[in-house]
Image: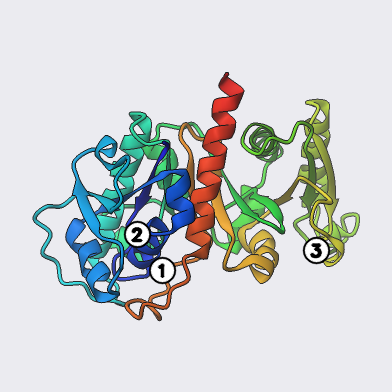
């Protein structure tokens, strides 16, 4: 049975809670072996706090987790004695969030786990602990020794990939290049085929400016960069269309009209998706050497420690990781 490594995230946020609840799910346990990664005592704290019905068990290796009825935890800090401060930003929680990611990637690279699901972290606490990555996507890409990656947000609403990820809006335009858009479109197209099983994907490409630039009246990025990149993609037999004005596109878009949507920046693609699928959206990192998904929400410090966090997005992230693992294995046969 496939082993899915699930990181603790920031233990002062809702990461441990959604990880424990997801690992206890009968649906998840019937289809894979969920293995939690992090300090055992931190998981134990929350399991006791919420009176979790299913017992937890410390294991030494992923293979020890297979077939167990308990929620299994790979302890990365036997000497853990930090005070858990739900809802607070601390350097220590950032440190162990980072260490859990490192261990989970290590297990996947060594083929001891089939995929990883990363619980939410705080970029601020990660940085305070010495991790300088813009986000988990970039961190996992680097740790897995992958040459590049793209973020794909997945839900019943659709699959949305991003040309740029965690950068200021003021830097989006200067970060867009014809070559960069083509490269990301190629990764997106390949992922839809290989990871999602769509033989001939259709991809809608959004413009950057209002009205997609209005033929150069409201910005020239569409004319000088985005349209030429789409033409290059078509020449490579990628079925890409656009650039579409983002507001009109999402106003008329219906599920299934395209197999993928390619947005120019973070909020352009994620706001409409989260409006439709906030509790079930999934973040998938395509183009890397391992399989990584995560829930489409943050640490939710405002409700941390209250026992009311919804694990639906984490459960969906585990399901997607498992399905992509099966799809990739089928392609290799």
CB-based contact (under 8 Å), mark 2 and mark 3: no
The CA span between labels 1 and 3 is 28 Å
Could you tell me which residue is drawn at 56 percent across and 55 percent down? 282
Q: Residue furthest top?
A: 333
Q: Is residue 326 above or below residue 293?
A: above
Could you tell me which residue is drawn at 67 percent across and 71 percent down? 275
Could you tell me which residue is drawn at 73 percent across and 36 percent down? 198
Q: Earlier in the sequence, mark 2 or mark 1?
A: 2
Could you tell me which residue is drawn at 52 percent across and 64 percent down? 312
Residue 137 relative to residue 270: left or right: left
Examine the rendering and report whether any part of residue 154 can be seen. Answer: yes
Image coordinates of residue 153 in percent, x first then y, are 61, 53
Q: Secondary structure at mark 2?
A: loop
Q: Residues within 10 Å of mark 1 (few under 14, many from 20)?
A: many
Where residue 228 sits, quadrant-wise, is top right
Residue 220 relative to residue 314: left or right: right
The CA span between labels 2 and 3 is 32 Å
- Which residue matches tag 3? 250
Where residue 214 sits, quadrant-wise, is bottom right
Q: Secondary structure at mark 1?
A: loop
Residue 182 relative to residue 211: left or right: left
- Which residue matches tag 1? 299
Q: In this view of the protein, which residue sits in the foreground, 148 or 300?
A: 300
CB-based contact (under 8 Å), mark 2 and mark 1: yes
Q: How is the image coloured?
A: rainbow
């Amino acid at each position: 049975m496939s082993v899915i490594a699930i990181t603790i995230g920031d233990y002062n946020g809702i990461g441990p809670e959604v990880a424990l609840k997801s690992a206890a799910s009968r649906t998840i346990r019937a289809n894979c072996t969920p293995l939690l990664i992090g300090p055992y005592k931190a998981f134990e704290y929350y399991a006791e706090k919420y009176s979790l019905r299913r017992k937890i068990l410390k294991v030494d290796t992923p293979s020890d987790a297979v077939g167990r009825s308990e929620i299994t935890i790979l302890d990365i800090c036997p000497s853990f004695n930090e005070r858990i401060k739900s809802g607070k930003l601390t350097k220590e929680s950032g440190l162990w969030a980072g260490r859990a990611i490192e261990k989970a990637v290590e297990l996947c690279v060594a083929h001891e786990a089939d995929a990883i699901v990363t619980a939410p972290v705080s970029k601020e606490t990660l940085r305070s602990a010495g991790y300088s990555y813009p986000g988990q996507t970039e961190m996992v890409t680097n740790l897995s020794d992958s040459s590049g990656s793209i973020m794909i947000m997945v839900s019943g609403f659709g699959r949305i990939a991003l040309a740029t990820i965690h950068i200021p809006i003021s830097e989006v335009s200067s970060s867009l290049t014809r070559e960069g858009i083509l490269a990301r479109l190629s990764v997106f197209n390949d992922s839809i085929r290989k990871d999602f099983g769509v033989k001939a994907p259709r991809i809608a490409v959004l413009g950057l400016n209002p009205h997609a630039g209005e033929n150069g009246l409201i910005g020239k990025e569409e004319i000088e960069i985005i349209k030429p990149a789409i033409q290059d993609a078509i020449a490579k037999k990628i079925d890409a269309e656009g650039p579409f004005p983002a507001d009109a596109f999402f106003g008329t878009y219906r599920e299934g009209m395209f197999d993928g949507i390619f947005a120019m920046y973070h909020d352009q693609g994620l706001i409409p998706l989260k409006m439709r699928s906030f509790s079930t959206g999934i973040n998938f990192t395509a183009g890397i050497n391992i399989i990584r998904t995560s829930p489409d929400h943050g640490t939710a410090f405002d409700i941390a420690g209250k026992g009311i966090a919804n694990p639906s997005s984490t459960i969906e992230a585990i399901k997607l990781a498992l399905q992509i693992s099966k799809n990739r294995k089928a392609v290799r046969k």
